[in-house]
Amino acid sequence: MLIVDIRSEFGLRVRELRARSGMSQELLADRSGLDRTYISGVERGERNISLVNIEKIAAALNVSIEYLFSSERFSANLAYQQKDFKVPFLERFKFHLDTDRKILAFQVNGLLTGENVDYMSRTLLGITSAFSQGELNIFVDHREMKASDGEPVVYSPEVAERAVQFQQKVISWGKQAVVLCNSEFMVHQMNHVTTISGIRDKAVHLYGKDKEMIGRAYELLDINGNELIKPMK
């Protein structure tokens, strides 16, 4: 009975992380090199999964094996559905340039598409290119990156791929990037994305109690506040 419970619990965990990444079972199977029916069996708690396949699934989800067994839990509702994009992107994307402190802050509420990332890249690259390389700090707020059900999400595979290009164009030009995340899941994914884009050494991804997270970000940026990114009420 205990084995069945462990299988079911692990399967639900995989389903949650897959869903909050906007991935179908087919896509997770493709990314992990496993069969879709195998992934389905894992999620239903029917498979006595090996450590090798646990490692493959963790890699496909851009998390560590340890995180797969974390207590952080999510809704198993599939994100990146049409209803998640009812509010236009330009109403959810904001940015602010502090020329005195040389900080470019931007904030995204809700979900992103690949096209949204490309738009941000064009918009923000026009700002960063006006400064010398290594002169501008980048401050990113992803705390409210949530689906229509109010639950946190991470980048979909498409968005993550575009984010690599975005970081290579925009973030790499800056001095450092400080990112406020909506979950430990996002911290893991952002660590993965910045490693691929080659900026891992200049990016800090934070998650925790809001006041403490904001305080740490302000400390890293050597500021006492920001016009755009503030503690939540």
Image (cartoon, grey):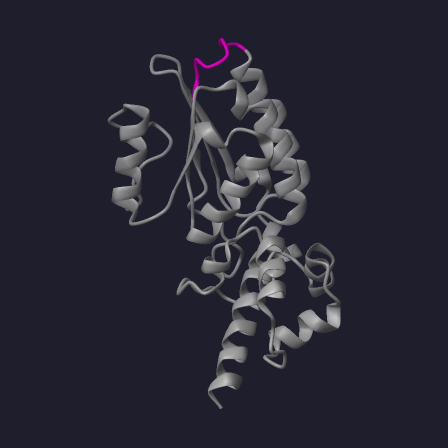
Indicate whether 120 appears above or below 34. above
Residue at horizontal 65 percent and vertical 31 percent from the top: 118
Q: What is the quadrant of residue 104 in the picture?
A: top left
| Closer-to-camera residue (185/143) | 185
In the image: residue 230, left or right of residue 118: left
Asked if residue 43 can be seen in this view, the reply is: yes
Q: Measured from the top left, where is residue 193 in percent x and y?
A: 56, 39
Give the main secondary structure of the magenta stretch: loop
Residue at horizontal 53 percent and vertical 57 percent from the top: 148
In the image: residue 61, left or right of residue 6: right
Q: Measured from the top left, where is residue 202 in percent x and y?
A: 45, 27
Residue at horizontal 67 percent and vertical 69 percent from the top: 39
Indicate whether 84 appears above or below 70. above
Queried whether the magenta region covers residue 142, the answer comes back as no
Which region shows up in magenta? 130-138
| Closer-to-camera residue (54/92) | 54
Indicate whether 231 appears above or below 138. below
Asked if residue 77 can be seen in this view, the reply is: no
